[in-house]
Amino acid sequence: MTKTLSEIWNEVDGCRLCRLCETRTTIVFGVGDPNAEVMFIGEAPGKQEDLGAEPFIGAAGKYLNTLLSHAGLKREEIYIANILKCRPPENRNPLPEEMEACTPFLRDQVQAINPEILVTLGNFSTRFILRTDRGITGLRGQVHLTGRFSVIPTFHPAAAIYDPSKKPFMEQDFVLLGRLLEKRRAEKAQRLVAEKCVQPAADEIRLPATEETSDECFS
């Protein structure tokens, strides 16, 4: 049974499944449109996120907002969550036991939001979602399929801030995201038109096409 975001939050609230509960300021659950077509998955909260209880509100978040424009998206149109809900001390990498404790919450979030596209930011989220040991450099720049989801891996925005040479590649990945999203929306619109044409209401009388009949259903 799919849980709601509120139900998942009730399970996460006050979590003490790993030692990060001893050093966190707050739990950073996730934020955005609960019906988003695109869900972004990062690594873990940083200092600003730990203080503000919201993912990607520091420098990396500002850069992410800029990148979204390359995909024709706005921040309020997406949902963002992390592999970990609590900040690791000194922003170190997530430990295996921390990921094991926290990723069931992320799985539930993905199921609750039911996005069409997942964008994984950095190695940890990419390896978890795609179940691979390959690095992000060899995986980015293309669309991967896992289950019913299309996955676009890219660098973490923080990595591009520290290494500006990654920025052109991230911009390319977000352009790819925009194109995929446009394609999905066009396909969805075509399906709706087809369904409208071949599934008349029960009491509708189908008349032969005339010159005044729209050709929308016959193109």
Image (cartoon, helix red, strand yellow):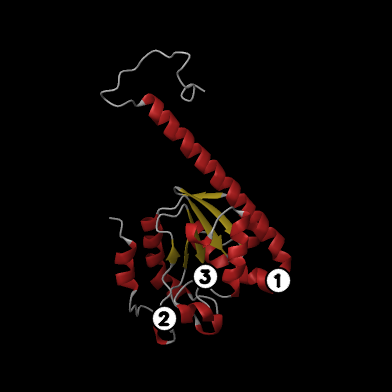
Q: Is residue 171 visible?
A: yes
Between disc 2 and disc 1, the foreground one is 2
The answer to which of marks 1 and 3 sits earlier in the sequence is 3
Mark 1 sits on what residue? Answer: 163
SS at badge 1? loop
Mark 3 sits on what residue? Answer: 43
215 shown above or below 54: above
Give the distance between the C-alpha atoms of the residues marked 2 and 3, in whole angstroms. 16 Å
The answer to which of marks 2 and 3 sits earlier in the sequence is 2
113 shown above or below 165: above
Give the class, few, some or many, for how many residues have Cα within 10 Å of label 2's Cα (few <14, many ≥20).
some
- Which residue lies most toward the left here? 203
Percent x, y of residue 188: 47, 39
Q: To which quarter of the image does residue 163 belong?
A: bottom right
Percent x, y of residue 43: 52, 70
Percent x, y of residue 34: 40, 58
Mark 2 sits on what residue? Answer: 26
- Which residue lies most toward the right here? 165
Which residue is at the front of the view, 96 or 168? 168
- Left or right: residue 82 versus residue 68 is left
Q: Across the whole image, how many numbered discs are drawn on residues?
A: 3
> Which residue sits at x=47%, y=37%?
189
146 shown above or below 107: above
The kind of residue tagged 1 is: Asp
Give the distance between the C-alpha atoms of the residues marked 2 and 1, in whole angstroms. 29 Å
